[in-house]
Amino acid sequence: MQFPNAYKGVSKIFIAEILALIGALVMVAGAGIAVGGAVTAIDSGSLDAAGGLVTGGAITMLGGLVLPIIGYILQLVGLSQASKDEPKNFKVAFIAAIVALIASLVTGFASSIEWLGSLLTIVAGIANICVFVFTISGIMELARQVNRSDVAALGNKILWLIIITYALSFVMKIIPIAELAAVLGIASAILSLVTYIVFLVYLSKAKKMLAV
């Protein structure tokens, strides 16, 4: 194994992304259960049954919150490990992840100051994009070093997908025509999902590449 630290790091990043995805799905399921409980209470007037559903939904949503937190910790550890074998990109991704975390935490305390909250939200968003971009760039650099041009080429395609996705998101926010903005919003959401799935596939391919 030529890059053992990168293999361990990318493996942890992959698990982190899976946990984040599961957490999001659990949150949606929990919200659905809670809403179902509220609807049951309105329709039937059975507060006991509805209360059980609402409580169950809240507990499920709590689980959905815990998983991404664990995933974020794993991501930081993974980026730190991977940077030992490829410091040029993974170290930047690690720093960007720290910046995103700090900005997100401070945003919660600065919610009463509108301009500061908006600024921190933008900083967190840019930092998260950097995590994506430099993680992919780090894998691409390792792929070149082990003569895996196919993995490097796929990384380049994902980078273009990310650029297009965020460009659509930006245009959607500034365009004055509501109908067109809505269409662009749907296209951006679909493209974001596709990009995320391809990113997971890419991490899986990178794990197999680095395991050799």
Image (cartoon, rainbow, N blue to C red):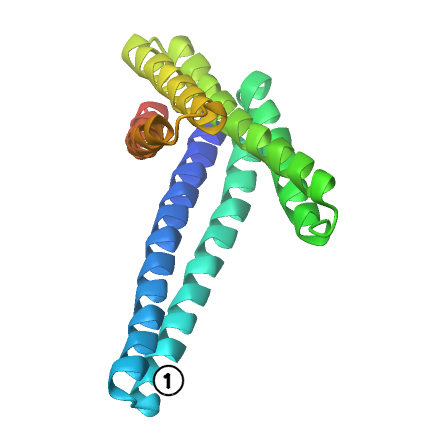
Which residue is situated farthest in the left direction here?
44
Task: From this view, report whether residue 152 is shown above or below residue 77.
Answer: above
User: Where residue 154 sits in the image (x, y, percent)?
Assistant: 31, 16
User: Where residue 16 sits in the image (x, y, percent)?
Assistant: 43, 44
Residue drawn at (32%, 54%) of the image: 25
Label 1 secondary element: helix
Q: Is residue 83 visible?
A: no
How packed mark 1 is, by other alpha carbons closer than 10 Å (few <14, some 14-19, many 20 or more), is some
User: Foreground: 93 or 194?
Assistant: 194
Residue drawn at (38%, 68%) of the image: 60
Name the residue carrying label 1: 51
User: Foreground: 155 or 15?
Assistant: 155
Quarter assignment of residue 14: top left
Task: From this view, report whether residue 182 is shown above or below residue 209.
Answer: below
In the drawing, does residue 117 fall left or right of residue 21? right
Number of marks drawn: 1
User: Where residue 198 sits in the image (x, y, percent)?
Assistant: 29, 28
User: Foreground: 208 or 70?
Assistant: 70
Residue drawn at (42%, 72%) of the image: 59
Amino acid type for the residue under numbered disc 1: Gly
Q: Is residue 13 visible?
A: yes
Q: Quadrant of the C terminus?
A: top left
User: Foreground: 80 or 112?
Assistant: 112
Which residue is situated farthest in the front direction here?
177
Task: From this view, report whether residue 76 is shown above or below residue 131.
Answer: below
Quarter assignment of residue 118: top right
Residue drawn at (39%, 44%) of the image: 15
User: Where residue 208 sits in the image (x, y, percent)?
Assistant: 30, 28
